[in-house]
Amino acid sequence: MGRIVGLIRGDGIGPEVTDATTRVIDALGLGIEWDPLPAGARSVDKYDDVLPQRTIDAIKDYKIALKGPVTTPIGMGFKSVNVQLRQRLNLFAAIRPVRNMPGIKTRYDDVDIVVVRENTEGLYSGIENEITEGVVTSLKVVTAKASLRIARAGFAYCRRRKRHKLTVFHKANIMKLSDGLFLDCVRRIHKEEAQDIEYEEMIIDNGCMQLVKDPTRFDVLLLENLYGDVISDLCAGFVGGLGVVPGANIGEDCAVFEAVHGSAPDIAGKNIANPLALIMSGAMMLRHMGEVDAARHLRKCYDQVLENGDPGELTGDLGGTASTDAFADAIIKRI
């Protein structure tokens, strides 16, 4: 028996892209055993919860999971599955690599950026109050503990993946206490632990302009929660969108790798969704598990399909006619 990995198949196109992804990973012969876990809108009828405790317990036990896109029902009082996963498993670092993919033409060339986002606090702490009718406050929470932790993770990623520069985006010129604390913590880790990594700071509005002018000048970006959410999607637009970028949520004890696009209910069940984003996340997962050679081989194989695949091997969004399953088969053939 190989290692057990929790599998959240998700909603909408989730089951189709996760099934395609597990078939591709199984073809590598690593002996991974998948344990399907309930989460999302589909789990409400059976468990009356979008994220049952048994799913949290299993991921804590296995230490790792692969997650397809999930839907949180609107107007039913359920908190976002993604937010719950990050908070309940303390997945404090969101990692989003963004690079130009072979065969996918965009307005920008040579983009190779990694967005590292603090994942547990900031405005996404969800502390909101209605002071009086028509007046609402939302509390931005920034702690030294979380800021030091994500700064250390960002510099460690640079060193581990041989990245040369880390840029922190902030708004400390206006939010002098909250963003000021975040910035001070990043500076401290750089000074004490990471002087071998080139470091720069940029006010986020200027940073957005510089990204659009020339994204190739950036290497690793480090941001607090809300900024990281926005900038990671902006960067995905440089290379073709959320369908061609992977995502990971990393904690001290657990890690969840996911497709960052939506569940696309309008095309669910049609076997036409592109599973590439989740397959790429699967490659990140394999690297995290120590299966570095397998991860590199998988990346090489899907790059080959994108660059040299015929129309019958590429899904419609990539200019081809392939089904979800046929795209996965094209990768498996090259494996």
Image: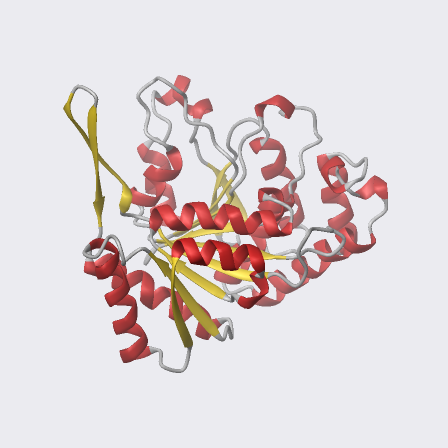
Residue 324 to residue 98: above or below:
above
Q: Nearer the viewer, residue 60 or 156?
A: 156
Count of all numbered marks drawn on residues in the image: 0
Q: Residue 214 vs residue 49: left or right? A: right
Q: Residue at x 42, y 78 (%)?
A: 197
* Residue 29 in the image, given as x and y percentages of width and height: 65, 56
Residue 205 to residue 11: above or below:
below
* Residue 16 in the image, given as x and y percentages of width and height: 63, 33
Q: Residue at x 79, y 36 (%)?
A: 322
Q: Residue 108 vs residue 114: left or right? A: right
- Residue 32 in view of the camera: no
Q: Nearer the viewer, residue 265 or 54?
A: 265
* Residue 250 in the image, given as x and y percentages of width and height: 39, 55
- In the picture, residue 146 is in which quadrant? bottom left
Q: Residue 44 vs residue 1: left or right? A: left
Identify the image quadrant of the C terminus: bottom right
* Residue 93 in the image, given as x and y percentages of width and height: 37, 55
- Residue 184 in view of the camera: yes
Q: How is the image coloured?
A: secondary structure
Q: Residue at x 57, y 60 (%)?
A: 215
Residue projecting furthest to the bottom:
196
Residue 44 to residue 6: above or below:
above
- In the picture, residue 156 is in which quadrant? bottom left
Q: Nearer the viewer, residue 207 or 20?
A: 207
Q: Residue at x 23, y 44 (%)?
A: 140
